[in-house]
Image: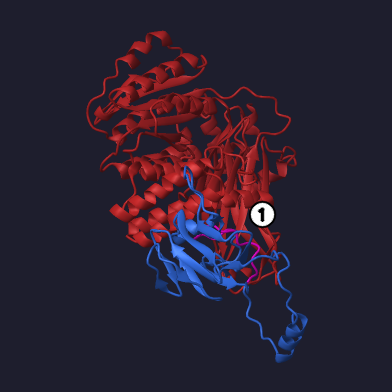
Amino acid sequence: MIICPNCQHENVEGAVYCVECGAQIDGVETLVTKAITDQEIEEELKKKAPRPEADSVPANSWLSLHLMDNGKILPLASRNEFTLGRLSEGQPIMPDIDLTPFQAYASGVSRLHAVVKRDGNRVVVMDLGSSNGTYLNGRRLNPHLEEELGHGDIVALGKLKIQILLRDI
Amino acid sequence: MPAYQQDYYALLGVPRDASPEEIKRAYIEAAQKLHPDKNKAAGETEIFLGVQQAYETLSNPSRRAQYDATLPPEVNTSLPYRHRIVQSRTSIGRLNEPQMHYLILELEPPADSQKTSSPPLNVSLIIDRSTSMLGQKMDVVKATAIQVLRSLRPQDILSVVAFSDRAEVVIPAAYNQERSKLEPRIQAIQPSGATEIFQGLEAGVKEVMRSIDAKRVNHIILLTDGHTYGDEQQCLSLATKLAEQGIGVSGMGIGSEWNDIFLDALSTRTGGNSAHISDPQDIKRILLEKFNALTQTFAEDVTLEVRPVDGVEISYVFRLQPDPAPIPSVDGKYHLGAILQDTSTRAIFEYIIQPKAVKSETLTFMDGTLKVSMGTQPLPVPPLRMRLSSSVSDTPPTGSPPLEIHQALSRLTLYRMQERARKEIERGNFDTATRQLQMLADNLIAQGERSLAHTIAFEVDSLKRQRSLSEEGSKKMKYGTRSLFLASPKKELVQ
């Protein structure tokens, strides 16, 4: 059995593409249940003990978006305001961050969905009147009202969950 | 003595190691076709007598052994076509769960073959003349039919049938007609009445049967723009009989008010294909392309007959080219259509292998016979045994399958996503279908297929609001995802 990393659908062994969402899955490791001894765990921990900071993060990045569905981290820098959404044909205003590669359409992300801003020492999020709403830690936000963000908060654009990683400013 | 009488095996079209059952079946099939009460062409009665003699000899074990001793060793085993097989994995894993295995079968004319003259045609064009065809559709169909008539070679036979709730033969199948005199008959077709496809199909079949000949490309082209009511089963069982006779059916639906699932089922069981003509302007191009393909026929009626293997199931068969379409199994037979002079025929097979099939060291997952009919060959083409085995290993090879299979599957996955979604709609699972179509649209955007993605996004809305797809949109989805197979990969392009 191969579990699709994108949609969690259980595909028959030997499948090359997920029948449910079309994602390529032939590179995905087969799930095999294996007993792990305590010793192995300790050795594994030792190997990976000093976890270095991701080296590609620019020095002046004040905010990173952790896309929880696939574990990708997008560091943001150089500006104080970013609009989030997805690109689509014939659209006059483009979002600063295009979330199309992260299944934005399927998750119900609007073309201009929300904005994150740095305002002095605070970082805020504001919904831009999106169709499916913006949620902060599971609570739906009123559109066009700023809400303060803390480190580790989870913002959901429709169903697309993003964890906010703040850097001390 | 004619050449074919020298080899009883060639005469019956069976390999030399054929089992008694295979010989019996080949005899019955040949007898049905060649019996003096039924055969059409001159000389077939003589062939039938030869077939009878062959069967009398080969059906008796001692006489067969005697005859085998007199046979010269099999020298001419080379087939008049080339075949190639690619498998997704080099060996099959010994797993405690079901697993999938893919293979691509490719058939093409031999590399050194000079462009041999293609067999003459025996085609019946069946035209829907129901009231809804009135106007531009009918005008373009008539003009195209006349153009086809003019462009045919002298040896070709074309019959034309028009039908509504009854059928009439506009041009009967006959040799050496003075074609310019037939044009006014096509001009005179007037639209009126309802659509009853069986009426038209039956009349067209009669015309094709008049001059049916293994040396010709026997084909039926059905042009319709409407739903037929109540006679679908009749049509399908007629098509199954046509497939046995080596007559292909191609269905062309004009506009959006026709039943694509029915037309697909009708054509693919004969090895033909269905096409969606959304704009009447395209009738001419698509019909001329079809005739052009028919005159390019190298071999036809490619049929793979498989015997069931315990624990192994062929779960899906899809012809990748020419004319991408899923191929249904009709009594264990897959009609793959024709091999063209300039395009190879490729089909992908999906297997599901159960744990009980991988107990021993090797697994014969395919046990079949490939039959091909070639009008230009005097003798029946010997059938090709397709017995494919794979070693079974405890550690299945990891990594990706060959690029060819990968590319085919990347598109097939998209086609099957819309197929799955339509099934879910039939079952009433609208939320599941909506989600699946949305994911299909996402995938198409990622591959740069924006207009198709747009169509599907529109259908997603329709599904949410009305709990159904639009007639036009569901056809665009189906034939749009099929046409992806014909395009070169777009993924690599920088947008």
Q: Is residue B324 above or below residue B296?
A: below
Is residue B317 visible in the rendered image? The answer is no
The colour applied to the residues of chain A in this rendering is: blue
Q: Is residue A141 above or below residue B389?
A: below
The colour applied to the residues of chain B in this rendering is: red
Q: State the image coordinates of residue B325 (x, y, percent, origin top left).
A: 49, 44
Residue B454 picture quarter: top left
Q: Is residue B92 left or right of residue B277?
A: right
Front-lying residue, A23 or B271: A23
Is residue B119 visible in the rendered image? The answer is yes
Front-lying residue, A106 or B129: A106
Q: Secondary structure at mark 1?
A: strand
Q: Looking at the rendering, in which quadrant would you find the N terminus of chain B?
A: top right
Which of the chains bears the disc numbered 1? Answer: B
Mark 1: give few (<14), some (14-19) or many (20+) Cα within 10 Å: some
Residue at the location (41% across, 20% down)?
B145
Q: State the image coordinates of residue A51 (x, y, percent, origin top left).
A: 73, 77
Magenta segment: does it hold B399? no
Which region is colored magenta?
A: A17-30
Which residue is most to the left? B193
Residue at the location (68% across, 50% down)?
B403
Front-lying residue, B15 or A162: A162
Q: State the image coordinates of residue B323 (x, y, percent, origin top left).
A: 52, 38
Q: Is residue B285 above or below residue A143?
A: above
Q: Is residue B329 above or below residue B81?
A: below
